[in-house]
Amino acid sequence: MTVKLTVENAVQAKQEIEKLETQGYVRDNIHIFAHFKERADDINDALDTSDVGMKEQGFLQSMKNMFTSRGDELRNKMEAAGISKQEAEAAEKELDNGKLVIIAHN
């Protein structure tokens, strides 16, 4: 099952991740998205969660993301993490407003 949550900051993200863990999700399958890559990397590092990479996307999509806009990259990664195209588009708008999106999957 895939879960998508939206939070305001890293403190709220930490709380939600702890709740997800009590529900059986493991940190390797919990991904935090932020509009700015540096912010996402810092939060993923601090909370020991993972970025969506080749494991979820496949090699070709990972390479393609190197040459696309940040918005396209985020939507592609969110879809690879398990949400629909429409959900990814809506989530990307939340990221544009400074929020964080958490996607967890089993």
Image (cartoon, rainbow, N blue to C red):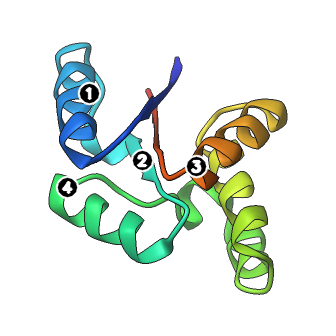
What separation in Å lies between label 2 and label 3 (alpha carbons)?
18 Å
Mark 1 burial class by Cα count in 10 Å: few <14, some 14-19, many 20+: some
Tag 4 near tag 3, CB within 8 Å: no
* Residue depth check, mark 2 versus mark 1: number of the one nearer the observer: 1
Position above or below: 36 against 79: below
Q: Residue at x 28, y 60 (%)?
A: 43
Earlier in the chain: of badge 2 and badge 4, it is: 2
Disc 4 secondary structure class = loop
Position above or below: 92 against 45: above
Residue 16: mark: 1
Which of the pair 63/7 is nearer the observer? 7
Q: Quadrant of residue 106?
A: top left
Mark 2 burial class by Cα count in 10 Å: few <14, some 14-19, many 20+: many
Q: Residue 92 at what x, y percent from top left?
A: 68, 48
* Residue depth check, mark 3 versus mark 1: number of the one nearer the observer: 3
Identified by mark 4, the residue type is: Asp
What separation in Å lies between label 2 and label 4 (alpha carbons)?
10 Å
Residue where numbered disc 3 is placed: 97
Disc 3 secondary structure class = loop
Identified by mark 3, the residue type is: Asn
Q: Is residue 29 left or right of residue 49?
A: right
Q: Is residue 18 left or right of residue 73?
A: left
Q: Residue 50 at what x, y percent from top left?
A: 35, 57
Earlier in the chain: of badge 4 and badge 3, it is: 4
Q: Residue 57 at what x, y percent from top left?
A: 66, 58
Q: Residue 72 at what x, y percent from top left?
A: 78, 64
Identified by mark 2, the residue type is: His
Earlier in the chain: of badge 2 and badge 1, it is: 1
Residue where numbered disc 4 is placed: 48
Q: Is residue 64 left or right of residue 78?
A: right
Residue 31: mark: 2
Tag 1 near tag 4, CB within 8 Å: no
